[in-house]
Amino acid sequence: MPAVLALQVMFTTGLSLLVARWAAALPDVANLIRMSMRIWLYASAVFFSFDDLLKDRPDIQMVLEANPMFIVLDIVRDCVLYATTPDPMRWVWLGGWAVGMLLIGFITFWQAEESYGR
């Protein structure tokens, strides 16, 4: 669980840095953040499992399973609810998302560092 939490914190920190730059430039982005976070919550299968719903559509299921928050939930469910070892590819995907988003967010935020606070 600590490893999943660390990767999730890396991902969300990078995403926060990226969105902070957008919100600093365009204040209306703050309204879009609330709506998009709610859509993302429901698309991450927090309240339901979509395995049975999409077994006829593997292409859509593959896109939904690439969602980084779905991967976090899937790993936690495997550990806590099912007491099984998560698929190693899930760790690779989550690690890629976490490191990639942290780098992109940090670089994007850092590039506009001089414009903040004006």
Image (cartoon, grey):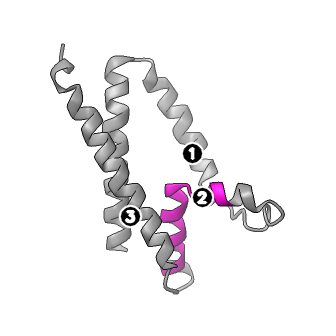
Q: Is residue 13 visible?
A: no
Magenta residues, dominant SS class: helix
* Residue at x 63%, y 50% (from the top left corner): 43
Q: Residue furthest left?
A: 114
The image quadrant that residue 49 belongs to is bottom right
Residue found at the very far top of the displayed protein: 118
Q: Position of residue 17 (x, y in %)?
A: 30, 38
Name the residue beneath numbered marker 2. Answer: 46
Part of the protein shown in magenta:
62-79
Residue 69's spot in the image, x, y percent? 50, 56
Q: Which mark is residue 40?
A: 1
- Residue denoted by label 3: 95
Relative to 34, is 98 on the left or the right? Answer: left
Q: Earlier in the sequence, mark 1 or mark 2?
A: 1
Is 112 left, or right, of 44 in this rendering? left
Nearer-N-terminus badge (3/1): 1
Q: Is residue 13 left or right of residue 70?
A: left
What residue appears at the point 48 percent right and 64 percent down from the top-left corner? 72
**Of marks 3 and 1, the one in the foreground:** 3
Q: How many marks?
A: 3
Residue 56 occupies quadrant: bottom right
Rendered image: mark on residue 93: none
Q: Amino acid at mark 2?
A: Val
